[in-house]
Image (cartoon, helix red, strand yellow):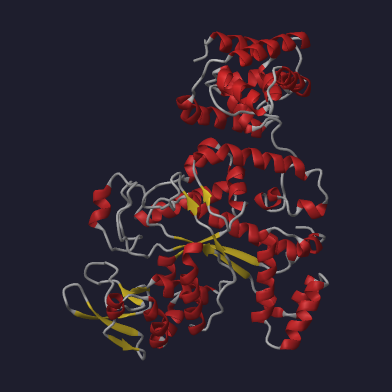
């Protein structure tokens, strides 16, 4: 981060900077004691004197803790990635805002001590999991046979992807925190404030649940299961609770050392207090849960973190995506058809608006990312810091992207019937002199993605149609115009002008109907890229042959 960024960050309009400024305000509000200290700190912030701010107040030298949570009861999905990506964007904005003089950490926390409540729908070997229902996820056997437990398997899947993307984070296991004693002090506070926690929780529950609810979930010494049972006795002096085990036996266990875990809302609050979390975002469906956990965090002597509530992702049918159902996209799905950067870009866009998260959003997200990357280099610093690619690349976007859009590559694959990247490069190297997979690595990656997307989604849905008399005349005219340009012409603008002229002379008004006709007759789909650019890359001789084949009905 460069020091000059702080003044731009104070005026930046994008949501990560709004969050970063709110977080800094929280630190001043909660870490400074007197009103005089807070007033002076605000003056220093407005003046951009962050070095002086940190030197004046030693409290700011302790790291600012960002956290994101993950429930490993199912295979990791894109929503999990999105939360880490978005939190990373806020962290980068905070570092820019404060000249990176206040240390930060990002904890990726796994709730892997939760009991397995049901078997995920998208797991094949269900029998293994069914036998271990209600045991902690780090005790449940791995149905894939690769790790000591199902929780560790899913944790590894998440870490592998986050590492591959280059996230800077600290992975933290709930099981390790409970068993190592890291949570012990806060758990003992929860035991001492049991009644206060119940006063917060019980009004949020139904009558039947209230009768048996306890913030502590003991782990049966006999079955190893996480039990939803009432707490019958509490012994603050020795740090224990008494409960009825599954066979009815009264059993006393400590609340420390991993003998119990907390219900999820008190657990969330306990984690904030124990780890000193300063920032955590959550889905819109958890607004009430955040409110309740904030109250409990205060009871435990902590300060609730700053954060905001994002909208949920929806599948193709408008339903919330779910780890257990396996609907929507997985991270692996997206990376078969699009770059990690396009996925991060999609996560950046409008986090407070519900968005479909299905295969058909990938091409659009990819091309929008490329457009923003192209625009970045010509923008002044104030606009660059609000450009989405600044956030996608944590303030260090590459100098260039791809000279060819993803939608154009898709149609090139379609027209050329390309089954491997070598075929596409035969066209691309002619259009972009000197270009090779080595000099254009992003374009080479996109070529592979385009082939995958075409084979899986475009080819099965192609529907060519015959041209009507007006369309036929216009296409014959276009073919003649392209011949007049010379078969070696690669000037996309010049070609596009002839496409416009052919459509206008044929009476297409507006011209959209003319382009739809070209796409449906020649490519078997209702939309496509800029036709001039497509023809320039595909080659005029091949484009003319494509037009002639389409008019003869040979493409269907």
Total numbered labels placed on residues in the image: 0
From this view, report whether residue 279 is shown above or below residue 233. Answer: above
Residue situated in front as seen by the camera: 388 or 352: 352
State the image quarter where residue 547 is shown. top right
The answer to whether 393 appears left or right of 319 in the picture is right
The answer to whether 505 appears left or right of 286 in the picture is right
Q: Residue furthest bottom?
A: 237
The answer to whether 460 appears left or right of 400 in the picture is left
The answer to whether one can see residue 137 in this image is yes
The answer to whether one can see residue 172 in this image is no
State the image quarter where residue 420 is shown. top right
The answer to whether 186 appears left or right of 33 in the picture is left
The spot of residue 225 in percent (x, y) is 27, 67
Residue situated in front as seen by the camera: 34 or 238: 34
The spot of residue 31 in percent (x, y) is 65, 80
Task: Tell me which residue sits at (62%, 51%) in the image.
Answer: 349
State the image quarter where residue 439 is shown. top right
From this view, report whether residue 508 is shown above or below residue 66. Answer: above
From this view, report whether residue 171 is shown above or below residue 366. Answer: below
The spot of residue 518 in percent (x, y) is 62, 21
Q: The N terminus appears in which quarter of the rendering?
A: bottom right
The spot of residue 370 in percent (x, y) is 68, 39
């Amino acid at each position: 981060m460069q020091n000059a960024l702080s003044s731009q960050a104070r005026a930046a309009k994008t949501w990560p900077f709004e969050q970063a400024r709110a977080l800094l305000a929280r630190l001043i509000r909660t870490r400074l004691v007197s009103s005089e200290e807070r007033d002076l700190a605000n003056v220093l912030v407005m003046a951009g004197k962050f070095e002086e701010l940190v030197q004046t107040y030693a409290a700011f030298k302790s790291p600012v803790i960002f956290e994101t949570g993950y429930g490993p009861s199912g295979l990791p999905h894109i929503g999990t990635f999105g939360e880490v990506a978005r939190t990373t964007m806020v962290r980068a904005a905070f570092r820019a805002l404060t000249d990176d003089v206040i240390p930060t950490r990002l904890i990726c926390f796994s709730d892997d001590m939760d009991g397995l409540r049901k078997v995920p729908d998208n797991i094949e070997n269900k029998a293994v999991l069914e036998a271990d229902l209600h045991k902690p996820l780090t005790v449940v056997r791995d149905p894939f046979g690769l790790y000591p437990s199902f929780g560790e398997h899913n944790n590894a899947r998440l870490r592998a992807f986050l590492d591959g993307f280059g996230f800077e984070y600290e992975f933290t296991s709930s099981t390790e925190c409970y068993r190592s004693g890291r949570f012990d002090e806060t758990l003992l506070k929860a035991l001492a404030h049991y009644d206060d926690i119940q006063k917060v929780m019980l009004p949020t529950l139904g009558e039947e649940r209230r009768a048996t609810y306890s913030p502590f979930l003991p782990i049966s010494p006999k079955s190893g299961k996480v039990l939803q049972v009432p707490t019958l006795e509490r012994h603050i002096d020795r740090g224990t609770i008494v409960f009825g085990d599954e066979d009815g036996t009264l059993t006393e266990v400590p609340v420390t050392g991993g003998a119990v875990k907390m219900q999820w809302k008190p657990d969330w609050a306990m984690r904030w207090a124990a780890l000193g979390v300063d920032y955590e975002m959550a889905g819109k469906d958890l607004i009430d849960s955040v409110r309740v956990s904030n109250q409990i965090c205060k009871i435990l002597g902590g300060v609730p973190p700053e954060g905001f509530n994002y909208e949920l992702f929806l599948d193709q049918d408008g339903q919330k995506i779910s780890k257990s159902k396996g609907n929507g996209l997985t991270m692996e799905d997206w990376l078969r058809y699009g770059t990690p950067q396009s996925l991060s870009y999609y996560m950046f866009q409008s986090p407070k608006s519900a968005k479909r998260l299905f295969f058909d959003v990938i091409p659009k997200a990819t091309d929008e990312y490329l457009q923003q990357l192209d625009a970045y280099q010509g923008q002044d610093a104030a606009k660059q810091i609000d450009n989405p690619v600044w956030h996608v690349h944590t303030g260090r976007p590459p100098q260039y992207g791809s000279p060819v859009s993803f939608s154009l590559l898709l149609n090139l694959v379609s027209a050329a019937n390309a089954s491997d990247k070598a075929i596409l490069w035969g066209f691309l190297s002619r259009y972009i002199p000197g270009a090779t997979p080595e000099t254009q690595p992003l374009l080479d990656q996109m070529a592979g993605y385009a082939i995958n997307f075409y084979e899986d989604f475009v080819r099965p849905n192609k529907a060519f149609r015959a041209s009507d008399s007006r369309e036929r005349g216009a296409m014959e005219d276009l073919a003649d115009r392209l011949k007049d340009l010379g078969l070696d012409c690669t000037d996309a603008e010049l070609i596009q002008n002839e496409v416009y002229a052919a459509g206008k002379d044929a009476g297409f008004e507006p011209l959209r109907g003319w382009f739809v006709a070209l796409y449906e007759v020649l490519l078997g789909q209702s939309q496509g890229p800029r036709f001039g650019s497509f023809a320039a890359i595909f080659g005029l001789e091949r484009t003319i042959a494509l037009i002639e084949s389409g008019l003869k009905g040979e493409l269907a």
